[in-house]
Amino acid sequence: MSYYFIARISVHDPEGYERYLAGTGPLLERYQATVLAVDEAPAVLEGEWPATRTVLLRFPDEESAKAWYGCPEYQALAQRRHASSSGDAVLIAGRE
């Protein structure tokens, strides 16, 4: 069953955030993630969406998603993200 990573991110240091992004591709590939959407201005239909970027990734299963997020390489990159942005992230199960 697929698992989805959803993040709402408010970037306050675009250059630092770009340094974070520069290292993400190979790790996403290693853990078989697919970038389904990245949107700088999603259409808010209800409530508030206090973010400057929304990201949706698909992983083939829960194990892959958790392995990606918890791996030392990603956690090192995540420090760059934390320094250049704030946000919320969730992992949700698909319904296949």
Image (cartoon, rainbow, N blue to C red):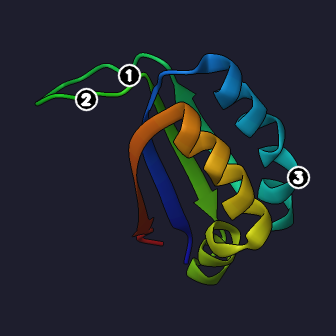
Query: Could you tell which of marks 2 and 1 lies nearer the N-terminus?
Result: 1
How far apart are the two marked residues, 2 and 3, measured between alpha carbons? 29 Å
Q: Which mark is residue 42?
A: 1
- Left or right, 47 with respect to 42, comes to left
User: What is the x, y in percent for residue 43?
Assistant: 31, 19
Q: Which residue is mark 2?
A: 49
User: What is the x, y in percent for residue 4?
Assistant: 50, 60
Q: Find out whether the residues at labels 2 and 1 contact each other: C-beta distance under 8 Å.
A: yes
Q: Is residue 37 above or below residue 40?
A: below
- Left or right, 77 with respect to 85, comes to right
Residue drawn at (73%, 58%), measured in percent from left and top?
Answer: 76
Q: Which residue is mark 3?
A: 26
Count of marks overlaid on the render: 3
Q: Which mark is residue 32?
A: none
How far apart are the two marked residues, 2 and 1, measured between alpha carbons? 8 Å
User: What is the x, y in percent for residue 64?
Assistant: 68, 76
Query: Could you tell which of marks 1 and 3 lies nearer the N-terminus?
Result: 3
